[in-house]
Amino acid sequence: MGVLEKVNVRGRTAAQPVPVLPLDQILRGDCIAHMKALPDKSIDCIFADPPYNLQLGGDLNRPDGSHVDAVTDAWDKFDSLAAYDKFTREWLTEARRILKDDGTIWVIGSYHNIFKVGSAIQDLGFWILNDIIWRKANPMPNFKGTRFTNAHETLIWASTGEKARYTFNYRSMKTLNDELQMRSDWEFPICGGQERLKKDGHKVHPTQKPEALLYRILLASTKKGDVILDPFFGTGTTGAVAKRLGRRWIGIDREGVYVEAAQARIDAALPLDESALTTMQAPKAAPRVAFGQLVENGYLAPGTVLTDARRRHRAVVGADGSLKCGDAAGSIHKLGATLQNAPSCNGWTWWHYEDGGALKPIDALRQTYLLATQP
Amino acid sequence: MGVLEKVNVRGRTAAQPVPVLPLDQILRGDCIAHMKALPDKSIDCIFADPPYNLQLGGDLNRPDGSHVDAVTDAWDKFDSLAAYDKFTREWLTEARRILKDDGTIWVIGSYHNIFKVGSAIQDLGFWILNDIIWRKANPMPNFKGTRFTNAHETLIWASTGEKARYTFNYRSMKTLNDELQMRSDWEFPICGGQERLKKDGHKVHPTQKPEALLYRILLASTKKGDVILDPFFGTGTTGAVAKRLGRRWIGIDREGVYVEAAQARIDAALPLDESALTTMQAPKAAPRVAFGQLVENGYLAPGTVLTDARRRHRAVVGADGSLKCGDAAGSIHKLGATLQNAPSCNGWTWWHYEDGGALKPIDALRQTYLLATQP
DNA sequence: TATCACATTGAATCAAGTC
DNA sequence: GGACTTGATTCAATGTGAT
């Protein structure tokens, strides 16, 4: 802990001092002030769980008379909606400045604040990628029966701009969801049991987030070694999960009691081993193979006939890796698109070859070639 | 149809002409202009499905090359985010004026517009009661694999002010939900089948809402005989459901083709008997558990070794819920099938973990997880 | 008639690299 | 910067037609 590391920051000359990031540390104090001290474009991902501006009236009691330990802390009081709006725009402005061009930001909130947050995010030029719903498996009921049970919270995920690149580990998310695309609604239990930090029998923080939520967020939108900033660190869920997943982190919080609890928690967290950190990679991470290479290397002889899966189209492999079908000719992709009259076509999966009476996609040959040639 | 009726409007003296409401009628034209002609505090409930300001880029094709029929209508085009914001505040201002003091408003949207809508609702003095998530049972996938599947829309439900009274039929909602409090996340399929209005084989409106959604909304927040206004009437789902539930309605839309379709639809709708009120429940979501959820929630740590029942194969759990065994990797089902050289495999029963010297199928962990999280 | 195979479709801010 | 090339990518429900 406490090791300072240098990072390369685009746009600074060698003559200027290179700013250092306080990696894997908790900074105690005002989040805006601490963010102002961080260099431009130095952070890969921000996760923020800002005060919700709950504006609860009096005390809340359950039907049996017991008291509900609601969010009444001083840090959640704002004089007005306008003051909350101003605070939101200030910290989001700093967040945008310190994010790398290809970084993303996550903010979680409820209906009390999320519309102000989302509106500010759009006004500041962020580009919303998704809004995500955390469906609580076990929400607190609405004791008075006056509204619908408030059973979810909303997250906004945004890049730094419309054209900005960003990290999305599509394959990992699909694997995590049993080979179905991960949807925008996620179900997790609220944080409780052993995971919930307690002191003298009372919860340390009123809104501690479940580690499972941060786990999915970081696995989806960051890479190993990325730097994640949490400006409202609380009990340090972000830091604990980042450490487990081999990511770097920076936390900011004003409250000493949270900082202490978070530090102890993170010190006790164990990183996963390397083998477990390996996740499913997108095929594009594998080296590119040109169709012609298969021909050159004898995996497919010139003159071989390829067809689509239903044998409605036939084409002949040329010596240069081109395909010919009547008057039409071109690459595996181009000819496939032409024959289907489609704007585009992935020739690897569309074209098939005969193998012992069965049709197999030529992509199978590419896999064989890759296995044979990669170390 | 077309009958004008008098209503009592608070705050007007007997000497002034009592304004009349165009009950059970569709008004064709600009919604703001038509709302301006309605009297103050005369409407019990507003349901609004405004343009979402989608800002779509070019064409989108499915992996099979077919084309996605997107929302390209002129009514969804705005020059800028600021222009959309201005439009939103204008119609919401009129909405607040014509709502009775104890009335409520519902607005539906997606992440493209809902934050602007919610922010304006709060600024105009409405008081948000709930935000509701419509979880789509069958959303359109994200074809390019670039983001999470956009599988929900958001509704905001608000009263006219912090201290305002409002109608919430708690008992009806609890009954509708098998004697459990109705939560803030609702699951319905998107509108299709017989319900979807078509003309010459094409959908009449690109974004027709399911009747089940309006049914729950009106049953929850209005009383029999209440007047419901829909300023973006479209194909008239609000009117059709209001008629069935014995409510009065007013619709506004600019497009003649929608007005005609809506009128015919509502003419054909039959009011329900009282006894039929509970027939439209959405089927309960079957609890599906992905293997990755067990990893995320700490039921199985990444790095754990799994084997088949006879310990002939060993695999390591990855952080994303994948399994790795030598060079082969994939989901529990895929890897199981690969190792057995079988077309498919139920990974839940094939893979086992060590528990006190005994091998147990990972399906046992799934059962434990379900017991812990399902009510 | 029932079943199966196949086609169609839905509010979507839906690519990345080279020349 | 624009044109061009390469190539990666889908889930659930409904409807239709063949067996």
Image (cartoon, coloured by chain):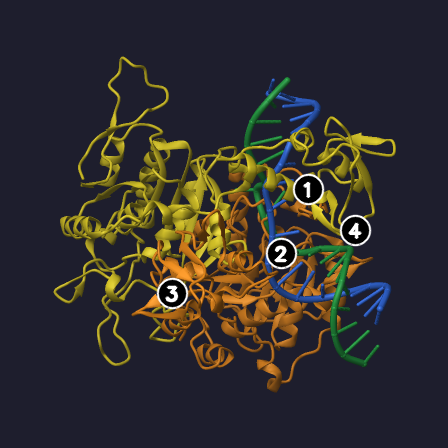
Chain colours: A yellow, B orange, C green, D blue
Cβ atoms at labels 1 and 3 below 8 Å apart: no
Residue A362: numbered disc: 1
Q: CA distance from mark 1 to mark 3?
A: 37 Å
Q: Position of residue B90 (x, y in %)?
A: 53, 48
Residue A270 position, x and y percent, is: 25, 50
The picture places residue B1, in percent across and down from the top left corner, at 73, 70
In the rendered view, tell whether residue B153 sits above or below residue A353: below
Per the rendering, the mark at residue B232 is 2
Label 1 sits on a secondary structure element that is helix
Residue A141 appears left or right of A5: right
* Front position among marks 2 and 1: 1
Q: Amino acid at mark 2?
A: Phe
N-term-proximal mark, 3 vs 2: 2
Label 3 packing within 10 angstroms: few (<14), some (14-19), many (20+)? many
Residue A310, numbered label: 4
Secondary structure under the numbered disc 2 in the rendered image: loop
| Disc 2 chain ID | B
A374, B180: nearer the viewer: A374
Viewer-nearest residue: A331 or B240: A331
Marks 2 and 1 share the same chain: no
Q: Nearer the viewer, residue A360 or B111?
A: A360
Q: Nearer the viewer, mark 1 or mark 4?
A: 1
Q: Are marks 2 and 4 on the same chain?
A: no
Q: Alpha carbon of mark 3 to alpha carbon of mark 2: how far?
A: 56 Å
Q: Which residue is mark 3?
A: B353
In the picture, measured across the screen, residue A329 lies left or right of residue B61, that is right
Within-10-Å neighbours for mark 4: few <14, some 14–19, many 20+: few
Q: For the residue marked with disc 3, what is the amino acid?
A: Tyr
Q: Is residue A316 visible?
A: yes
User: Residue shown at 81%/38% (left/top)?
Assistant: A315
